Image: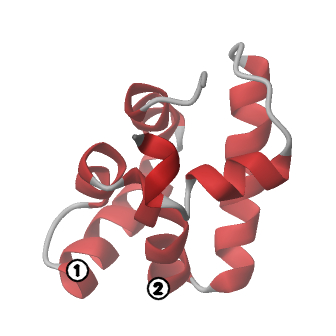
Amino acid sequence: MCLTRGLLVRFYGSLDFSLRSLLHFRSQSALGYPFDKVLVEEPWRTYEALVRLVGRHNAEVLLGMLYRWLNENGCSMDPETLRKYLTTREVWG
């Protein structure tokens, strides 16, 4: 598995400040903690959290951005596998 919590955090850090701020403050409001905590402590909840914070369409846009970023940074996987990692606890061991 090339997808790690560290890569998720690096992707999050690569987003524009305005998008990171939006995710951070919506996460604080809806979940009670910052979005990067989801990435580090519960990466299998990433997609669910994105849907809750920005809606399904925008979550899909962010998923596409993550997919392209991962492939450009040496972690090649298909979109279906990526979705599995962001929704299934068991794949994280």
Q: Nearer the viewer, residue 90 or 63?
A: 90
| Count of numbered tags | 2
Residue 3 lies, in percent from the top left, at 56, 30
Residue annotated with mark 2:
52
Q: Of the residues under marks 2 and 1, which one precedes in the sequence?
A: 1
Q: Residue at x 51, y 72 (%)?
A: 50
Could one spot residue 18 in this view of the protein?
no
* Label placed on residue 56: none
Does 44 appear above or below 16? below
Cβ–Cβ below 8 Å for labels 2 and 1?
Answer: yes
How many neighbours does mark 1 have within 10 angstroms: few (below 14), some (14-19), or many (20 or more)? some
Q: Badge 2: few (under 14), some or many (20 or more) residues near its Cα, within 10 Å?
A: some
Instruction: Inspect the image, locate mark 2, and give the three-letter code of the amino acid beneath it.
Output: Arg
Q: Whole-percent x and y of residue 24?
A: 30, 63
Query: Residue 89 at x, y = what percent?
Result: 44, 58
Write down the quadrant of residue 51 in the picture.
bottom right
Calculate the distance from the C-alpha at mark 2 to the C-alpha at mark 1: 9 Å
Query: Farthest right residue?
Result: 78
User: Amino acid type of disc 1?
Assistant: Leu
Residue under label 1, please give it: 31
